Image: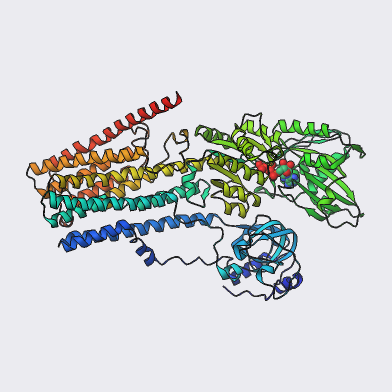
Amino acid sequence: MQEQSIARPHAETKEQVLEALASGNEGLSPDEAARRLDQYGENRLRESQRPSPLRRFLRQFNNVLIYVLLAAGVITVLLGHWLDAAVIFSVVVINALIGFIQEGRAERAMDSIRKLLVTRVRVIRQGESREIDAAELVPGDVVLLESGDRIPADLRILKARGLRADESSLTGESVPVDKGSDSVEGDAVLADRSSMLWSGTLVASGQVRAVVVATGENTELGRIRQATEDVESISTPLLKKIDQFGHQLTVVILTLAALVFILGVFWRDMAAAEMFLAAVSLAVAAIPEGLPAIITITLAMGVQIMARRQAIVRRLPAVETLGSVTVICSDKTGTLTRNEMTVRALATLGGEYPVSGSGYTAEGRLERPGEDDQALDKLLLGGCLCNEAGLERTEEGTRISGDPMEAALLVLAEKAQLDRSHCKREWPRTDAIPFESERRYMATLNHDHHGKGLILVKGAPELLLERCGQALAADGSRQALDVRDWQARQDAFAERGQRTLALAMKSVASDMTTLDESDIDEELILLGLIALEDPPRDEAIQAVADCHRAGIRVKMITGDHLGTALAIGRQLGIGDGQSGMNGKDFQSLDDDAVAEAAMNTDVFARFSPDDKLRLVRGLRSREQVTAMTGDGVNDAPALRSADVGVAMGQKGTAAAREASEIVLADDNFATIATAVRTGRAIFDNIRKSLLFILPTNGGQSLLILAAVMLGMVLPVTPVQVLWVNMVTAVTLALALAFEPAEARIMERPPRPPGEPVLTPMIVWRVVFVSGLILAATLWVFNWHMSTGLGLEAARTAAVNTVVACEIFYLYNCRQLHESIFRKGGLLGNPWVPAAIGLVILLQAAFTFLPPMQVLFGTQALPWQSWALILAVSLPILFIVEAEKIIMRWRLSQAAECKAA
Ligand code: ATP
């Protein structure tokens, strides 16, 4: 990348900077931008240095369980069992390799998710505003930003309104700083260069037009290298818990191994060398070597599945929290509804005018009877001028940009045969106050060519009604405002689920050139109301019902009018359709009452970001696990305080995305429900892997313990145990990572937060199945010893028994509680038969291939052995299913008792 230099842009005037960059208010031409992109490279920071592959490989050995294995290997060497030692050491290396590869896969999965979070930015090129990927910005580009946007490069401000930037990520200063276009002293320090905006910081409020002075590595951020909007790498409380579990297990294993040695030597009078070997076998048997890799891969796979379903997980712990969510607080517009607005009717003093057609197509008409209505004409004009949206009709279809509601007003103008560009030429805009959720209105100042000045305001009706003294009549006269009547008209629209906008105007002096909020405090003249329809998303209706069945409450939080919110709530099945709460009433409540309202009310209207924050706190104080959606910069605190913050990928700001755990690529409520479902499934699959792997370790450890207690020879050798743990168990368990969600996963209540991974039920089943594997293996081993087939054959048969038990038990593990003898129970996951097929091949090699026989001390087995192995292992399938029946019965009894 080439060095970009413009010495002190903060000290130069904006004209000088534009000149130095060979740019202008119209921005660059697309060709020039492309040329500069070639010259300077993409606007990205070089990937931060990852540890080298060798280091990542070596890191795999830094694990207590591996230390135990290494120690076991050393002891085996000391005992002179060279071959065994070689196998142990190779297993350690293979284990590290598997960990290394899986970690790489998981990292790549997370990388691909990071790529989904590209930042889009609005630039002016050749006078046209367009959205591009921030990576394509070049020095000289003119960009437009507003509150909540992340600053995509180092910028010199050209024009700003109410601009404040949050530069905490760069300077550590947590209070947003004021910014403006005036140049500052040449030697001002970074934090004092108020005419500049720095890459990686945020627009806290206001709007700005600025020119790019440095991109990529040449920005201040590039110099100090800091992580920005990022996806965390693989680590979750669950992984930490499992790690902890590993440590505890090690202590238990070492104690047991020592006990075996002591008991064997002093109680059973066995040779010390042989007891060493037994102790080593025990240690090797009990360590679930493959577990970390399995869990990591299950998580990574799950996160990828979620991304495919449009939910991008930024922080992995959210995957676990999702399964515990008890309340989802969702925005209305665009999340629960389609955000496809259509104007349905207009109301002026003169009457009501229905509008036909739907969506953004030009089909449909504004029904206006013969007589002239000047208020209607002005209302249409206002909708056109007090508007930032774009509507482009090409052969491929209609493209809208900006606020969908404003785009609907442009469609309305078309239906009324009003030419927007003509209006804009007739009434050029001098200044504007853009729409902000907190303000709930937008205003413009326009002048015609005869020197007349006109302020146009559009916004929430109750807000405008307060500021209007009069209304415009059809004949152009002004009449005193009948607030009650207008409110009743608004209520009538709201009752139908329509949202309403009011439009007002004010004539001003011709020399007025700037617009202030104080200019629209009073003396406005009401033009009329516009009613818009934004129907609920079909899939959201289904998703709300799914959530209710899954024991999750859904609450709607909106900036819209309460009446409209209640009507939409009725259509969606949120709340009782009658009761809701307005932001104003909510603000007057104390903390206790807030918690009470949070629990009992489902529809909240005219809510501000602060109200959202109090609502989340109220819910949390009542032990609710809350997911909260948001999009604006001011939603960030509420998103952060929620257990799962959910940001909108399309209409959300960078600030909201960074504050949240999950980003919805499609802004759709149904995606939250899908994420909850997938989160539950991932957690289930991790539990299933544990449930599957641990009994293998348990069974083999018990086998060795039993042998020592009974003074028998060891039924399995350490290397054979390693084969089972590392090869067969891992191969089979991996199939569980692909297990689809259980059929009734959204019919159970949320998982209690803080519930351990190993619930008493799981611990019980691990012990129970370990016992079954012990019994089956011991039986087969003893039968072989008693029939005189020899120790090697007996051990080979014992190992094959353990593996056969694993194969049948794998089917049991596909469902935690439910029976597998039903539709989709035995089939349904093609990875299971594939993994089993592979393991059968591996076992055949283990038993019959001469090199393997040398390595593992195995021997070919006659058919009678196989028949016996099948006879003792198959019943496990049925016994565990019978256990599930009893468990289900006990659970339902307990539930009945509780209900009674
Ligand atoms: P949600 O919070 O569910 O997304 P919302 O889109 O209705 O709901 P806001 O965008 O905060 O919430 O809008 C609040 C109110 O401000 C709207 O009900 C409307 O009256 C008014 N409003 C919305 N957009 C505009 C706009 N572009 N110009 C003027 N007024 C607007």
Image quarter (top left, top right, bottom left or bottom right) of the N terminus? bottom right
User: Can residue 845 be spotted in the picture?
Assistant: no
Q: Quadrant of residue 804?
A: top left
Relative to the observer, which residue lies in front, 316 or 354? 316
Direction from residue 148 to residue 440 in the image, left or right = right
Relative to the observer, which residue lies in front, 531 or 361? 531
Expressed as whole percent of the image width and height from the top left, the position of residue 715 reads: 16, 47
657 is higher (above) or lower (below) than 739: below
Direction from residue 184 to residue 569 in the image, left or right = left
Expressed as whole percent of the image width and height from the top left, the position of residue 482 reads: 86, 34
818 is higher (above) or lower (below) than 770: above
Expressed as whole percent of the image width and height from the top left, the position of residue 675 reads: 50, 43
Q: Quadrant of residue 431?
A: bottom right
**Residue closest to the far top:** 900
Expressed as whole percent of the image width and height from the top left, the position of residue 492 reads: 75, 30
Q: Residue at x 21, y 41 (%)?
A: 774
Ligand 1, what quadrant? top right
Relative to the observer, which residue lies in front, 316 or 891? 891
Direction from residue 282 to residue 516 in the image, left or right = right
Image quarter (top left, top right, bottom left or bottom right) of the C terminus? top left
